[in-house]
């Protein structure tokens, strides 16, 4: 096994390892298929520049998932759906207080070399 | 050197007074619009005319941080936010006098923020949050412009003969394009309306001292001759 194969295997193991930072994530595809996966979730406050010459506080959220798991489970990778006639990819997970949060995938950035997909999220009401 | 101004300077400048007046006008008219919407024979959601008005706030859209969150629970108010702030003051010498009155042109930034959150439409599709935020921002700036440029507010509520406000004008409206690195969870789009108001500013004046009182009256005699009577009181 090459170092690259090893890195890809290790990354998948790290992302989905309950004993580390993996977190339960529910992913729902536009055609309604819902699966429970594990990944790295992120939901933090951040300083942003809205081009008003004053920085303001914003909030960003993201989830990193195994590319191989997504491909095997859904047959394709999540994308940001802008078409209003379609449902978006929906990601749900709980915060540190156990509150259920639901998001729409606004952008998906796959790393085909190491096998991960970073999904940028935006708030979504189901 | 001895101080010459003997009165306490505490009156606000016209720029400050008019800034608060602009905010008050928007608040009052927004409330009235909501009443009119409620009274309409055909149903109209009054929230479509609601504006939350702030003055001189650096981060008013922080209010949207707690807007209806993505659990569907109702959090803070998602209605558009308007912030009125003084941006620039400039003075025209040709329209002023060097002793008492300055002709001031104040540019106000009337920033309108629209909030949008993606949501399912329960018909197999969804409403994008960025589209909602943009349309909300434009709806707010439309309402603000129509209120402030209404004929009722040609002099921003000031008495016409008060020499206070010369005129008001919308200089430009600019939409804030979201920064690419923003990628925020909630969509907020801003629209800045640059609103110019020309008004007078005054300053403490020298208070004169009465030296001699001189009064005169002009009369016309029966012959038609014009007579003048003077009184010189020491």
Image (cartoon, rainbow, N blue to C red):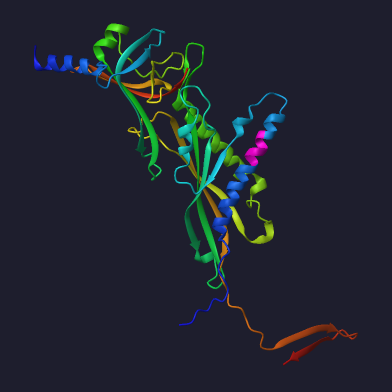
Among all residues in the image, which is located at the extreme left? A2
Q: Is residue B216 left or right of residue A54?
A: right
Q: Is residue A126 left or right of residue B48?
A: left
What residue is rendered at 45% in x and 43% in y? B59
Figure check: B91 above or below B86: below
Residue B149 showing in the rendered view: no
Residue A11 showing in the rendered view: yes
Q: Nearer the viewer, residue B59 or B125?
A: B59
Rendered location of residue A25, percent (x, y): 35, 16
Q: Nearer the viewer, residue B184 or B86?
A: B184
Q: Is residue A61 left or right of residue B198?
A: left
Figure check: B67 above or below B149: above
Figure check: A15 above or below B23: above
Q: Residue B211, located in which quarter of the rendered image?
A: bottom right
Magenta-drawn stretch, dominant element (helix, strand or loop): helix
Q: Which residues are magenta?
A: B29-34
Q: Is residue A100 magenta?
A: no
What residue is rendered at 24% in x and 16% in y? A17
């Amino acid at each position: 096994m090459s170092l690259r194969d090893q890195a890809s295997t290790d990354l998948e193991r790290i992302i989905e390892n309950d004993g580390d930072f993996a977190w339960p994530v529910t992913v729902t595809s536009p055609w309604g298929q819902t699966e429970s996966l594990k990944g790295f979730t992120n939901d933090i406050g951040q300083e942003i520049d809205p081009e008003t010459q004053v920085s303001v506080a914003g909030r960003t959220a993201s989830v990193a998932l195994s590319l191989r798991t997504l491909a095997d489970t859904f047959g394709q990778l999540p994308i940001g759906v802008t078409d209003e006639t379609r449902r978006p990819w929906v990601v749900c997970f709980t915060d540190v207080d156990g509150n259920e949060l639901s998001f729409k995938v606004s952008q998906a950035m796959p790393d085909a070399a190491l096998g991960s997909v970073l999904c940028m999220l935006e708030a979504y009401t189901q | 050197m001895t101080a010459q101004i003997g009165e306490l300077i505490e009156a606000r400048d016209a720029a400050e007074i008019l800034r608060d007046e602009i905010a008050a006008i928007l608040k009052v008219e927004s409330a009235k619009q909501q009443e009119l919407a409620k009274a309409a024979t055909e149903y109209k959601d009054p929230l479509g005319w609601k504006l939350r008005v702030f003055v001189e706030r650096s981060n008013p859209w922080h209010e949207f941080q707690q807007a209806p969150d993505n659990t569907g629970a109702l959090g803070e108010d998602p209605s558009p936010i308007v912030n009125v702030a003084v941006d620039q003051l400039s003075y025209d010498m040709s329209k002023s006098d060097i002793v008492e009155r300055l002709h001031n042109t104040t540019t106000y930034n009337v920033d309108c923020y629209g909030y949008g959150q993606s949501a399912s439409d329960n018909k197999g599709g969804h409403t994008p949050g960025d589209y909602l935020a943009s349309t909300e921002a434009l709806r707010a700036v439309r309402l603000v412009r129509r209120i402030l440029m209404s004929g009722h507010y040609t002099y921003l509520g000031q008495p016409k003969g008060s020499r206070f406000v010369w005129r008001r004008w919308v200089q430009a409206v600019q939409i804030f394009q979201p920064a690419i690195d923003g990628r925020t969870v909630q969509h907020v789009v801003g629209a800045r309306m640059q609103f110019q108001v020309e008004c007078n500013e005054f300053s403490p004046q020298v208070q004169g001292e009465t030296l001699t009182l001189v009064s005169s009256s002009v009369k016309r005699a029966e012959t038609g001759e014009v007579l003048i009577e003077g009184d010189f009181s020491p």
